[in-house]
Amino acid sequence: MATMPNTMSFKQGLSLWCPQSAALNRIPRVSVPSRSFRRSFVAAASFDNENREYVVVGGGNAAGYAARTFVEQGQANGKLCIVTKEPYAPYERPALTKAYLFPLDKKPARLPGFHTCVGAGGERQTPDWYKEQGIEMLYEDPVTGVDIEKQTLTTNSGKLLKYGTLIIATGCTASRFPEKIGGNLPGVHYIRDVADADSLISSLGKAKKLVVVGGGYIGMEVAAAAVAWKLDTTIIFPEEHLLSRLFTPSLAQKYEQLYQDNGVKFVKGAKIKHLESGPDGRVTAVKLEDGSSIETDTVVIGIGAKPAVSPFDMVGLNKTVGGIEVDGQFRTSIPGIFAIGDVAAFPLKIYNRIARVEHVDHARKSAQHCIKSLLTAHTHTYDYLPYFYSRVFEYEGSSRKVWWQFFGDNVGEAVEVGNFDPKVATFWIDSGKLKGVLLESGSPEEFQLLPKLARSQPSIDKAKLQNASSVEEALEIAQAALKTEAAV
């Protein structure tokens, strides 16, 4: 990781793209013609939405937490409209590659159990909740066009929507294999929404052999769920070890051993040539560039995601990290248009660079920060601390449940402490400063310490950490460094 100082990218669809550059507190504004109707909302029979003051495009985590913040500020009822391509009210998307994939006898997660905002300890916002709050929901009708001058949106069904303020929360789409190499064969799956997960579950119930392509978050989480289905499971990826953009080789080896102990096989450093199919058209094998083949009847592709910027390209894209460029209040270059969540390229203040973060924590916090900035005197710049986590093997009967958290920046030299029985911690130290920390199987108190360490970046004695006899001792050393830093 120290060899990649200009880029951090994680996940699945959880990624942090961070080129070194001066952080933008505000980005250049694009002038648009003045409009006397800007917030007048005159009646017009041609508009298909009743609530026109605020329109959120997208129905994921960011939209759900934005809705909650509008309600908290008393600005939702009769004013807020949410337009989504999904048939469901916003939900906590991480569940789709975790508990949602459990077999029926392992108590899988199902809606309405994980609607936002239960993931952050908030109220479960079911479709009835949106009705009660006076929020207009337009389901299964993605936005296909925008007219910035007229402040209107066009949807797939032909609806014409009016907005005063527009919040773009379109998230990401799964990166796919090209059709010419078998990316769309029956039995090949991608996971971004409930329909995708339901389709995969249908296949898992009939499958015997599963191949997971990708060694990131999706690959690890899907493979862990497949163990509960008792499938012959193989993970294929081009890197030398699991989650190579975050895990050190030593840390990855510990997780790989856990998966192997559960019967999962690995094919590392491999490149896929194409997917093969049988007489019925269904996938039957994964053909590698070295000429070998891996038989399978089900494939899950987990090779990352792309920001869903269409049809908002003209709002202003960041060509380096992707996504829609915004300032510290999530304002785009067009007055009255904001972007939040995975699709936003924003100033990562703590590291003085522009980033795009694909993670539920950022989706929640960016939505809350944006809406508070829009509706109140709240004007300070978004100050996000990168955070990633994973939870796997958490179904009933699992011999070992896994839950790790990471905060900060994985740059510099890594110091690993612990034997993974059950704890292990990794500390990243750069120029004598603690930059990032990962902890597996920590206590609540230990997990609460991690963001304090990563944000404060205290000076720390690397030799002391290396000589620590346990994770607990290493965390005590880090906490002492934190107190010393605070006292200076």
Image (spheres, grey):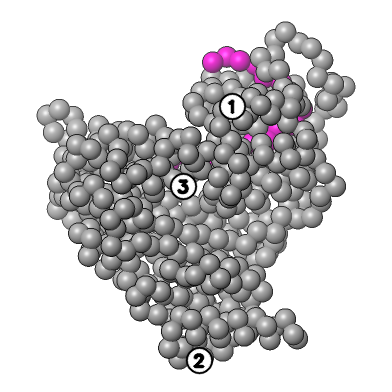
Q: CA distance from mark 1 to mark 3?
A: 23 Å
Q: Is residue 246 above or below residue 178?
A: below
* Magenta span of residues: 157-174
Residue 263, by quadrant, is bottom left
The percent position of residue 148, horizontal first and vertical second, equals 72, 27
Tag in front: 2 or 1 = 1
Which residue position is annotated with label 1? 128
Q: CA distance from mark 2 to mark 1?
A: 57 Å
Query: How many residues crowd mark 1 within 10 Å: few (<14), some (14–19), many (20+)?
Result: few
| Residue lying at 27% horizontally and 34% vertically, measured from the top left | 202
Tag in front: 1 or 3 = 1
Among the two numbered marks 1 and 3 on one chain, the one whose residue lies closer to the N terminus: 3
Q: Is residue 26 above or below residue 191?
A: below
For the residue marked with disc 1, what is the amino acid?
Asp
As drawn, the label of residue 463 is: 2
The percent position of residue 391, horizontal first and vertical second, equals 41, 57
Q: Is residue 446 above or below residue 149?
A: below
The percent position of residue 361, horizontal first and vertical second, equals 57, 53
For the residue marked with disc 2, what is the amino acid?
Ala
Q: Horizontally, is 312 left or right of 402 in the view?
A: right
Instruction: Quadrant for the C terminus, please.
Output: bottom right
- Secondary structure beneath dot 3 equals helix
